[in-house]
C-alpha cells in the first residue's frame, strides 16, 4: 500500500541534502492510469491482414462489414484482423495525463475507484496509437483502471525525476520516470505566501512580511521564531511543492 499523507520533516531534510542543486521538490500522491488497449499491428503479418487493413481504412467497420467488403467469410476476416493488446501507463498531472513507461508489478500503489465518465480521452485513445474502436467483439474492449501512487519528484532545469515511494516513503537510487521540465507547475509566489501565513497561524508565530523561495529554500524576513528543518508545503493539490524555512540570519 502507498504511504498516507506527506513524508515527515526528517525525510524531507534527507532529500534536501541528497538533491542540493535541484530547483524544485514535490511530494505527495498522483493517480496512475493503467490501460490495456486493442491496437492494430503496425505492419500486416500476411496478405489477408493487409487487405483487411485497407478495407478497414474505408470507414469504421466490424468483422461483418469487412467480410462483405472483401467477399470472404466473417470468421476468416476476424482471424486476420485480430487486435494486439498493449499496456499503457499515464501519470495524472495538473496539465493532464502524461504517458510514462509501464512500471514494474512490484510498485507500491493503492486501488483508486473511478467512473467511466472520469477517464480522460487521452488514456482511452493515446495520441499516435492506432487503437481499434470498441465493437461487439470482446477483443476490442479497452480495460482501464487507476491506482494512487505516492511519489517524490525532483525538478531540474532539463526535466523532472519522479521516484515512486514505498510504504515508508523509501525511494530508490534511480528515478522511476523522467518527465519534461514543465510537466508539473512550480508553486507561485502567492502559493508560498499562503502556505507561510497558514504555517504561522497554526504555530502562533507572527507572520513575517516577506518570504522568498529559491531552489527549495524559503527565506523569511523579520522572524526568528522558526526552528531548524521546518518545512512549508505549497499548493492545494495532492502533489505539493516543499521548501525548508530559513530565517534571514541562517
Image: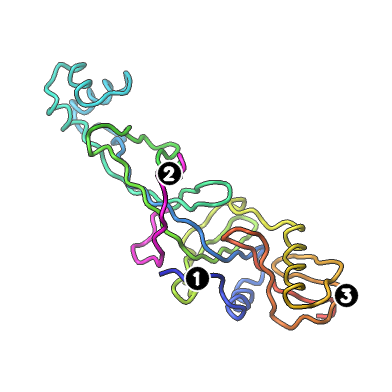
Q: Secondary structure at mark 2?
A: helix
Residue that carries the numbered disc 3 in the rendered image? 222
The correct choice, above or below, for 57 with respect to 37 in the image is: above
Dot label at residue 123: 2
Instruction: Please tell me how many numbered marks the rendered image carries.
Output: 3
Q: CA distance from mark 1 to mark 3?
A: 34 Å
Residue that carries the numbered disc 1 in the rendered image? 4
Q: Which residues are magenta?
A: 101-121
- The quadrant in which the N terminus is found is bottom left
Residue shown at 13%/20% (left/top)? 72
Mark sitting earlier along the chain (1/3): 1
Q: Nearer the viewer, residue 125 or 235?
A: 235
The correct choice, above or below, for 41 with respect to 244 in the image is: above
Residue shown at 72%/83% (left/top)? 228
Position of residue 55 in the picture relative to residue 76 (left or right): right
Mark sitting earlier along the chain (3/2): 2
Residue 230 picture quarter? bottom right
Q: Secondary structure at mark 1?
A: loop
Indicate yes or no whether the magenta region holds residue 190. no
Mark sitting earlier along the chain (2/1): 1
Indicate yes or no whether the magenta region holds residue 113. yes
Amino acid at each position: 500500500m502507498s504511504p498516507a499523507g506527506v513524508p515527515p520533516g526528517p525525510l524531507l531534510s534527507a532529500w534536501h541534502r541528497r538533491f542540493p542543486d535541484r530547483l524544485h521538490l514535490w511530494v505527495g500522491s498522483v493517480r496512475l492510469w493503467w490501460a490495456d488497449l486493442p491496437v492494430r499491428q503496425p505492419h500486416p503479418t500476411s496478405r489477408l491482414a493487409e487487405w483487411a487493413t485497407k478495407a478497414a481504412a474505408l470507414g469504421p467497420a466490424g468483422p461483418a462489414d469487412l467480410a462483405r467488403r472483401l467477399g470472404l467469410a466473417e470468421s476468416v476476416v476476424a482471424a486476420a484482423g485480430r487486435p494486439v493488446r498493449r499496456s499503457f501507463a499515464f501519470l495524472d498531472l495538473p496539465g493532464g495525463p502524461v504517458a510514462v513507461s509501464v512500471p514494474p508489478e512490484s510498485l507500491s500503489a493503492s486501488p483508486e475507484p473511478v467512473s467511466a465518465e472520469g477517464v480522460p480521452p487521452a488514456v482511452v485513445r493515446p495520441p499516435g496509437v492506432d487503437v481499434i474502436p470498441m465493437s461487439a467483439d470482446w477483443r476490442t474492449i479497452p480495460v482501464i483502471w487507476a491506482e494512487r501512487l505516492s511519489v517524490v519528484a525532483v525538478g531540474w532545469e532539463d526535466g523532472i525525476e519522479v521516484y515512486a515511494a514505498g510504504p515508508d516513503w523509501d525511494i530508490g537510487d534511480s528515478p522511476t520516470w523522467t518527465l519534461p521540465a514543465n510537466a508539473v507547475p512550480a508553486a507561485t509566489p502567492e502559493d508560498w505566501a499562503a502556505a507561510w501565513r497558514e504555517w504561522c497561524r497554526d504555530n502562533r508565530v507572527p507572520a513575517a512580511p516577506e518570504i522568498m523561495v529559491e531552489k527549495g529554500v524559503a527565506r523569511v524576513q523579520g522572524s526568528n521564531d522558526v526552528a531548524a528543518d521546518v518545512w512549508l508545503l505549497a499548493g492545494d493539490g495532492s502533489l505539493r511543492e516543499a521548501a525548508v524555512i530559513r530565517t534571514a540570519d541562517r
